[in-house]
Image (cartoon, rainbow, N blue to C red):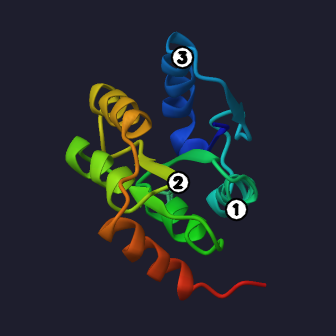
C-alpha cells in the first residue's frame, strides 16, 4: 500500500502531525506538499495527490485543507478517486468499508488533533467490504468520464 499525503497551507500543521503518527505506526508515505504555511492553492496539491492515487492499484491518499471541502471537490474530479471528507470516526470506517474510499480528506480548521488522529487510524485499519458494497462502488465507477 502506497500512502500519498498532501495539504494546502491551512492543512499544513495537521499534515505534519499525521506524518508523526504514521512514523509511529511504521507506515511509509510520500508527501507531495505543501511545505509551509505560506498561502497556496488547494486544487494544485489535491489534483497531484488524487492523480497519484488513481495511478496505483492499491494506492491511498490523505488530503487536508481548512474545511476539507475544496480538497474533496477537486480530488473527486479524478476518475478512479473516491475521496471522503470525514469529521467523525463512524463515517471514516464506513467510507472504507462501504464506499471503498481511497482518499481521506480532513478539515484542519474543523476538527481537533485528537479526533483527526482517531479518524486516520480507523480509516487506515478499515477493510473495504465486498458484496452489495462492491456492486454499488462499481456503479460509481460506471458514471465516470474516462479520458
Ligand atoms: C484556505 O483559506 C481555505 O479556503 C482552504 O484551505 C479550504 O478550506 C478550501 O476548501
**Left or right side of 90 for 103:** right
Residue 109 on image: x %, y %: 37, 44
Q: Nearer the viewer, residue 113 or 93?
A: 93
Residue 67 on image: x %, y %: 40, 55
Label 1 with label 2: CB-CB less than 8 Å: no
Label 1 to label 2: alpha-carbon separation: 14 Å
Q: Residue at x 68, y 53 (%)?
A: 57
Q: Nearer the viewer, residue 120 or 109?
A: 120
Q: Earlier in the sequence, mark 2 or mark 3?
A: 3
For label 1, the crowd category at 10 Å Cα-Cα, with few meaning under 14, some 14 to 19 and many 20 or more, is some
Per the image, the residue denoted by label 3 is 20
**Marks 2 and 3: which is nearer the front?**
2
**Marks 1 and 2: which is nearer the front?**
2
Determine the secondary structure under disc 2: loop
Label 3 to label 1: alpha-carbon separation: 24 Å
Residue found farthest to the top: 24
Per the image, the residue denoted by label 2 is 102
Per the image, the residue denoted by label 1 is 47
Label 2 to label 3: alpha-carbon separation: 21 Å
Residue 84 on image: x %, y %: 42, 58
Amino acid at each position: 500500500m502506497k500512502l500519498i499525503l498532501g495539504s494546502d497551507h491551512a492543512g499544513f500543521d495537521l499534515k505534519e502531525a499525521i506524518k508523526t503518527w504514521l512514523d509511529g505506526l511504521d507506515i511509509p508515505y510520500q508527501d507531495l506538499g505543501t511545505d509551509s504555511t505560506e498561502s497556496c492553492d488547494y486544487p494544485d496539491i489535491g489534483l497531484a495527490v488524487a492523480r497519484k492515487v488513481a495511478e496505483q492499484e492499491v494506492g491511498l491518499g490523505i488530503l487536508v485543507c481548512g474545511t476539507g471541502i475544496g480538497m474533496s471537490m477537486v480530488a473527486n474530479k479524478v476518475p478512479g478517486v473516491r475521496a471522503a471528507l470525514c469529521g467523525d470516526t463512524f463515517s471514516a470506517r464506513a467510507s472504507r468499508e462501504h464506499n471503498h474510499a481511497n482518499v481521506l480528506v480532513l478539515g484542519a480548521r474543523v476538527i481537533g488533533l485528537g479526533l483527526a488522529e482517531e479518524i486516520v487510524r480507523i480509516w487506515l485499519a478499515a477493510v473495504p467490504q465486498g458484496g452489495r458494497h462492491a456492486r454499488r462502488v462499481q456503479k460509481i465507477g460506471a458514471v465516470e468520464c474516462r479520458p
